[in-house]
Amino acid sequence: MKKNLLKFSAALLVTFLASGCNDDFLERYPLDQITNETFWNTENDLLVYNNRLYDRIGDDINVPILHGHDQGFNSHFGSLWNQDEFTDNMAPRVARHNRFQQVRAGMHNTTGGDQWFGYDGWFFVRDINVGLANYDKAAIPQATKDKYIGEARLMRGWFYAEKVGKFGDVPFVDRELNIDSEELFAARTPRAEVMKKVLEDLNFASTKLPNDWGDGNAPGRLNRWAALLVKARVCLFEGTFNKYHGIGDSKMWLEEAAKASKELIEQGPYSLYMTGDPQNDYNATHRMLDLTGNPEVIQWRKYKVGVRTNHVLNYFRGYSGGLTKSIVDDYLCTDGLPISLSPLYKGDETIEDVFVNRDPRLSQTVLRPSETEKYQYDQNDGRTYPRLEGNPGGGVKSTTGYHIIKNYNVNDLLGKAYNQGEMPAVILRFGEALLTYAEAMAELGTITQADLDMSINKLRDRVGMPHLMLGAVPVDPNYAIHGVSPLIAEIRRERRIELAVEGHRYPDIKRWKMGKLLTMKDYGMRWSEANKARFSPTSMKTSIDPKSGKEYIDVYKGTDFENPVFDESKHYFWPIPLGDLAANPALEQNPGWE
């Protein structure tokens, strides 16, 4: 039924667009066609129209808000998982992922046209505004209309927040445009004005959407709890961006982030997925093929043969390159101390040593060699892992030695043809709300131990890690570069670890004004004598880490991306494509990209 409704809504929109500029068509009101004047009558009409919006946000390349794995061929780069390739978390080296490598190394250029996850998708705003101009025509209770208005405004606010995060000022449009509308040639709307409108949209959505659509989240429509999490995410971004970039109000945004996340935590029906198994509970959700009824998942995208499929697992195993030494080193030891301070840290002389006495989330994110059979990696092919690029004998290869296991499910590979994958995408989950609340309260300077206990420490309880205590926050010298308090540093670390490979790292680096992190080389595993004996020959080159004086795989040595840069005057924003500047002379390019 839902599939049929989506098809019907697609046809409906085509009719709207085709008839929008033809006055004679609208005046005749043909009985055998749907028109704007005859359609908006019932709740089902509004539902059908909004189904079209859900169809639109399946396009992760142009409308990357409810970001999943896109579908078909695009899933090898369009996946939410690949967003960490823009950062110091992952290190791909395949030509098809050059865009990620260029951005991560600060070597991307102004493009002539479309770009992945870039200055695109404005058709989506038009679709939303068409609906918003017509929902009130329906002869149904206002509360019922508000549900669908709330859906549309949530999507519009989220869309604009994503564009502001990448481009800064953007043209804000809140009405349906035609070919002669003056807004088509308007200048960019100042960031503060756009974000004020965004907050109005998110506030409306988070009060008017229903708590539950009665769809069982299998998966379902966006509900009020999803709106609260989106609002919390957007407000945290804007609050910290304004604070660290010194461009505007931060307190109001941080207060809104804390308020929204706390409401979700205390009043919402969600909780962390826990069975009492700290060695498996963390990545269990990310490896499930069906997330219906999962208590932690607020929004997800389902893939099913015959409807929508992907091949994300086929490509991600090798195309992602693997996790970097930088993030692997960030996992705490089991005493709650960083590796720079803990006597439990065994070192990295061998790949096995890396996992000893560490936060269980490490071995649930990176493949531990002894667990190759447990995960049936790679489809129980009988090879020993990890495997580096250039190792003879086939198998899945890594550029770093740190194969990603967090989202690996062999059942989505066994016996399946190319592009028949059904790996779901976890888009919004409860754990993010806990992290957002803790960070917002810490940035406001009002955080208490009770706040930590209801947020960060719940995440640590799931994996059996010691609590973060206000009176005993470790001072990790490796975080001195951040220039923040030890408490905020630890909350940032927790966020990086908990949300690894979920697409949050790149916007986090930008909002914290920590572009300097992207000037550091991407290293992989230690190239000790023990590891050389096991993993040679390899095509990967190595270098001496100047900080430790030890030899590590140097992922991009000998490539165009060997020496990453980050220009503080330009790289916090992406350039507007030249084609858009040519089409609208009133647009101005972002600083440094002229």
Image: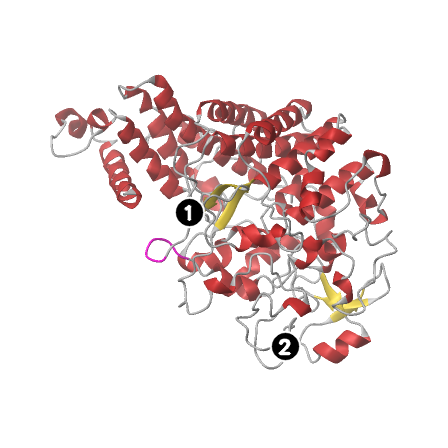
Relative to the observer, which residue lies in front, 101 or 552?
A: 552
Relative to the observer, which residue lies in front, 60 or 173?
A: 60
Give the side of residue 521 with respect to residue 209, left or right. Answer: right
Q: Amino acid at mark 2?
A: Gly
Mark 1 lies on a secondary structure that is loop
Which quadrant of the figure has residue 215?
A: top left
- Identify whether 451 is placed above or below 542: above
What quarter of the picture does the N terminus occupy?
A: top left
Mark 2 lies on a secondary structure that is loop
Give percent across and percent down for residue 27.
15, 24
Q: Is residue 484 visible?
A: no
Q: Residue at x 60, y 77 (%)?
A: 383
- Identify whether 425 is placed above or below 140: below
Which quadrant of the figure has residue 351?
A: bottom right
Which quadrant of the figure has residue 38?
A: top left
Which of the two labelled residues, at mark 1 and mark 2, occupies the earlier sequence position?
A: 1
Q: Residue at x 41, y 53 (%)?
A: 303
- Separation of residues labelled 1 and 2 (CA atoms): 35 Å
Give percent across and percent down for residue 238.
62, 31
Q: Amino acid at mark 1?
A: Asp
Q: Which region is colored magenta?
A: 305-309
Give percent across and percent down for residue 64.
48, 44
Q: Residue at x 41, y 44 (%)?
A: 218
Q: Residue under circle 2?
A: 390
Relative to the observer, which residue lies in front, 450 or 557?
A: 450
Give the side of residue 423 with respect to residue 489, left or right. Answer: left
Q: Residue under circle 1?
A: 59
